[in-house]
Image (cartoon, grey):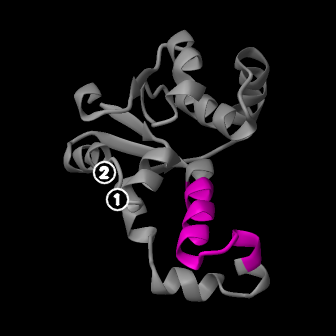
Amino acid sequence: MNIFIDSSVIVEYIKDNRTEVLEKLISSKHELFVNGIVFSEFMFYYLSVIGEKSPLTIKENKQIKTLIEKHNPIDLFSYFNALSIDNETLTLSYEFMKKYNLLPNDAIILATLKLNEIENFATFDKSDFDFPCKSENINLISSVEDI
């Protein structure tokens, strides 16, 4: 089974909250996927947590390299296959923004799922994705029981 992992699942994992879902997925034989949006959302959040400041302040203080080298999160992404975002993805995401009232990042994620024929989506943002995923025949995973 192919499963796309949302940044919300990875963020909760590093916060040591709701870790069981990602732990179960990583230990499974399922193929796990992310895209550049998920990586960006995660890293933006991660910088603010480890730097205890806004990511923009961290950038202005030239602390990004020091922080991510000291607290290296990149190994976590070795469990995932990265999917690209191309023109077709952007075009479909624009349609999903209009059709489902999605913000750009969420629309790009949904378009990535559709175009790569991934029918399972692990996310804790059910309120944003419940209706669009049901409409697009994508199974939402937000608990171990859903796996």
Q: Is disc 2 placed on a helix, strand or loop? A: helix
- Residue for badge 1: 16
Q: Camera-side residue: 67 or 139? A: 67
Based on the displayed image, in which of its 4 quarters is residue 42 positioned?
bottom right
Q: Position of residue 32 (x, y in %)?
A: 37, 44
Asked if residue 114 can be seen in this view, the reply is: no
Task: Report whether 110 appears left or right of 29.
Answer: right
**Residue at 33% across, 47% down:** 18
In the rendered image, the vertical position of residue 81 relative to residue 3, given as above or below: below
Based on the displayed image, in which of its 4 quarters is residue 55 positioned?
bottom right
Residue 52 included in the magenta stretch of the image: yes
Task: Report whether 76 appears left or right of 90.
Answer: left
Q: Residues within 10 Å of mark 1 (few under 14, many from 20)?
A: few
In the rendered image, the vertical position of residue 31 relative to residue 78, given as above or below: above
Query: Given the image, on which type of amino acid does mark 1 rest?
Result: Asp
Q: Camera-side residue: 70 or 76? A: 70
Q: Quadrant of the C terminus?
A: top left
Q: Position of residue 52 (x, y in %)?
A: 59, 75
**Residue at 43% across, 46% down:** 9
* C-beta proximity under 8 Å, tags 2 and 1: yes
Q: Which residues are magenta?
A: 39-57
**Residue at 25% across, 34% down:** 144
The rendered magenta stretch, by its main secondary structure, is classed as helix
- Residue for badge 2: 19
Query: Given the image, on which type of amino acid does mark 2 rest?
Result: Thr
